[in-house]
């Protein structure tokens, strides 16, 4: 059977039999991969902790009929240990890998892989508030999948100018004429923060008020879950309080 090598980040794992594990990974060149890691649950396994969630590895696999098989795994990024010791980081990372798993059901791109790895690295290092890293990841990942929210013009009619309503079902910020009754109202600080999160302007993000941060997080969560059609279960455990 043909073998191939790729860089991959582990999204989730499931037990298989007494000693094996099914590993779901997002790879740089081959998209989402489901593979069997044989003997990984045995003491002294050659894979060790390199195939745990949030870890990045250089993997050698061979193609199987239904599942590929991991032959080798070398660590490229050991982010799991720094993430799991902090509740805020852990829940944010869990929501990120769940989103990556859902977004890449068909075909992933190298940009999706690099975005996820960058987000996990930032979480592990505590570079910014965990919720802000998650929010920025969600916006960018949705954009890469073709669901970029409209933030600078009306998402429905294209009208330019500053708008004060956000409607997930309509694609983002909408003008007063397009906004349905009861639409979420967005103040200038929250609107600016949404744009900064999308652009990765971290000086603005880190300086945002708790009110704007919480408001932006709620809008982003609603937008992501609407377009993914099924809820992101991990988001229910993510705190809106700043965590580094």
Image: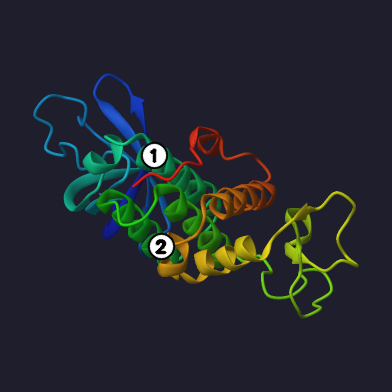
> In front: mark 2 or mark 1?
1
The residue that label 1 is drawn on is 88
The residue that label 2 is drawn on is 115
Q: Which is more toward the observer, 48 or 230?
A: 230
Count of labels shown? Answer: 2
State the image quarter where residue 166 is shown: bottom right
2 or 1: tag closer to the N-terminus:
1
State the image quarter where residue 169 is shown: bottom right
Q: Which is more toward the observer, 127 or 19?
A: 127
At a point 11% along the width and 38% down the height, the residue shown is 46
Measured from the top left, where is residue 47 in percent x and y?
A: 16, 39
Measured from the top left, where is residue 49 in percent x and y?
A: 19, 37
Q: Which is more toward the observer, 69 or 77?
A: 77
Measured from the top left, where is residue 17 in percent x and y?
A: 31, 21
Extreme residue toward the bottom, this view: 160
In the displayed structure, 9 sits above or below 174; it is above
Secondary structure found at label 1:
helix
The answer to whether 76 appears left or right of 232 in the picture is: left
State the image quarter where residue 90 is shown: top left
Cα separation between marks 2 and 1: 19 Å
Secondary structure found at label 2:
helix
Coloring basis for residues: rainbow
The answer to whether 141 appears left or right of 72 in the picture is: right
At a point 37% along the width and 56% down the height, the residue shown is 119
Label 1 packing within 10 angstroms: few (<14), some (14-19), many (20+) = many
């Amino acid at each position: 059977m043909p073998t191939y090598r790729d860089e991959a980040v582990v999204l989730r794992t499931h037990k298989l039999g007494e000693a094996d594990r099914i590993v779901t990974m997002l790879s740089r060149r081959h998209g989402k991969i489901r593979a069997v890691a044989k003997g990984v649950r045995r003491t002294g396994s050659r894979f060790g902790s390199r195939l745990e969630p949030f870890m990045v590895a250089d993997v050698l696999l061979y193609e199987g009929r239904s599942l590929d098989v991991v032959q080798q795994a070398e660590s490229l990024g050991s982010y799991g240990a720094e993430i799991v010791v902090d509740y805020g980081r852990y829940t944010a990372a869990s929501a990120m890998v769940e989103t990556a798993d859902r977004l890449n059901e068909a075909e992933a791109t190298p940009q999706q892989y690099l975005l996820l790895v960058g987000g996990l690295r930032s979480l592990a290092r505590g570079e910014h508030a965990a919720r802000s890293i998650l929010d920025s990841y969600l916006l960018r990942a949705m954009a890469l999948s073709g669901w970029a929210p409209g933030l600078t013009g009306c998402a429905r009619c294209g009208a330019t100018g500053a708008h004060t309503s956000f409607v997930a079902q309509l694609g983002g910020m909408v003008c007063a004429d397009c906004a349905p009754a009861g639409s979420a109202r967005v103040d200038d600080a929250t609107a600016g923060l949404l744009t900064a999160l999308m652009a990765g302007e971290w000086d603005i993000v880190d300086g945002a008020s708790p009110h704007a941060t919480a408001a932006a997080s709620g809008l982003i969560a609603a937008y992501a879950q609407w377009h993914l059609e099924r809820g992101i279960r991990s988001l229910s455990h993510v705190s809106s309080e700043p965590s580094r």
